[in-house]
Every structure is written in C-alpha cells, then in structure tokens.
Image (cartoon, rainbow, N blue to C red):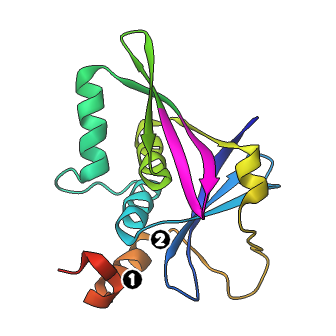
Amino acid sequence: MLKEMKIAGITVDPFTNTPIVLLKDLEEKDVLPIWIGLLEASSIATALENIQTPRPMTHDLLKNILDQLGIKVIKIEVNDLKDNTYYALIHMDVNDKRLTIDARPSDALAIALRTGASIFVEESVIQRSAKVDLSQKGDKVVTDTTEWEDILENLSQDDFGKYKM
C-alpha cells in the first residue's frame, strides 16, 4: 500500500557528512530518511527554496524537456529498499498513455518538486527503513540554500570518493 509523503527538509548524517532527505507522511507520523548525494541535495534544496538559477541545472533541464514534449509527471513512488539502497519510479502521462521509469529516489524527488507531482512511498519501505528521531537535540534540518552553499564550498576532493576531479 502506498502512503503519500512530502519533503520535510534535508539534514546531514553526523557520522558520514552525507546529506539525508527527510520525507514525512501527511499526518506527520512517519519519517523516511533517504541518504543522497551532495549534488542531488543541492538540487532539492534549491527547489525547496524556489531559487532560480541563471541557466537550467540538470533537473530543471529535464523538466523543461518534459514540458516541451507535453509529458506530465503524475507521481513519484519510492517502491523498494534492498541492501540499504532505495528504489523509485517516476509515473508519467505521455499522450494519454502511462509510462513508468526507474529512477534514483533523489532524482525522482528533485523532479517531483519541479513538476508538482505527488510523492508516495510503499509502506513496507517505511517499515524497513532506518528510523530518525527528529526530537533529539543536535539534529538540524537544512533547507536554507545559503547553508547548502557553505557545505558545498567547504568540500574537499576526498568528499567525492570515486568521483574525484
């Protein structure tokens, strides 16, 4: 069964400095943390803050392409969790035909924010996921783009692992 959720914000894992996007159900009972990459976190934070960039970034470009082709994103669905990896689907309407595309949750969420698509999570994924207690002191949800700029500016090449420049 699917549960509708919304993006509550982004925080940083204190042990790995990895960004975590936090999804909350509409009743704010369940929280789903999904560890994501720095660039995807920046893209999500930019959309959350309604920041317009001078040139389209990757997720903005994809939205523009979809718009030009008349493709509507209906919903995104975080549908599975295997070996600590989340899986997602993007459901689209293409000429009155439903098309479902496999995607990383971070990309699907960034696209959902830009297209206004609903976000759903399979309840079994919520039950099997890591638990985050937002009431603990020291947990900070970062949604301010300025804070993400500071995080990104202070990155070293070692933070990119196998994606080093």
- Vertically, is 118 above or below 19? above
- The residue at 31%/89% (across/down) is 158
Q: Disc 2 marks which amino acid?
A: Asp
Mark 1 = which residue? 151
* Mark 2 or 1: the one toward you: 1
12 vs 58, left or right, is right
On the rendered image, what quadrant is the N terminus found in? Answer: top right
Residue 156 in sight in this render: no
Report the number of numbered marks: 2
Measured in 3D between alpha carbons, the distance from the residue under mark 2 to the one under mark 1, in whole angstroms, is: 11 Å
Q: Secondary structure at mark 2?
A: loop
| Residue 9, image x, y percentages | 58, 63
Q: Callout 1 environment at 10 Å: few (<14), some (14 to 19), or many (20+)?
A: some
| Badge number at residue 5 | none
Tell whether position 82 is magenta.
yes
Q: Is residue 119 visible?
A: yes
| Residue receiving disc 2 | 144
Q: Name the foreground residue: 161 vs 7.
A: 161
Query: Residue shown at 74%/87% (left/top)?
Result: 137
Q: Which residues are magenta?
A: 76-90
Rendered location of residue 160, percent (x, y): 31, 80
Q: Are marks 2 and 1 in contact (CB under 8 Å)?
A: no
Q: Is residue 161 left or right of residue 41?
A: left
**Quadrant of the drawing holding the C terminus:** bottom left
**Prevailing SS of the magenta stretch:** strand
Q: In the structure shown, which secondary structural element does the residue marked by tag 1 occupy?
A: helix
Residue at the (38%, 60%) spot, across then down: 46
Left or right: 101, with 71 as reference point: right
Residue 58 point in image, percent of width and height: 26, 51
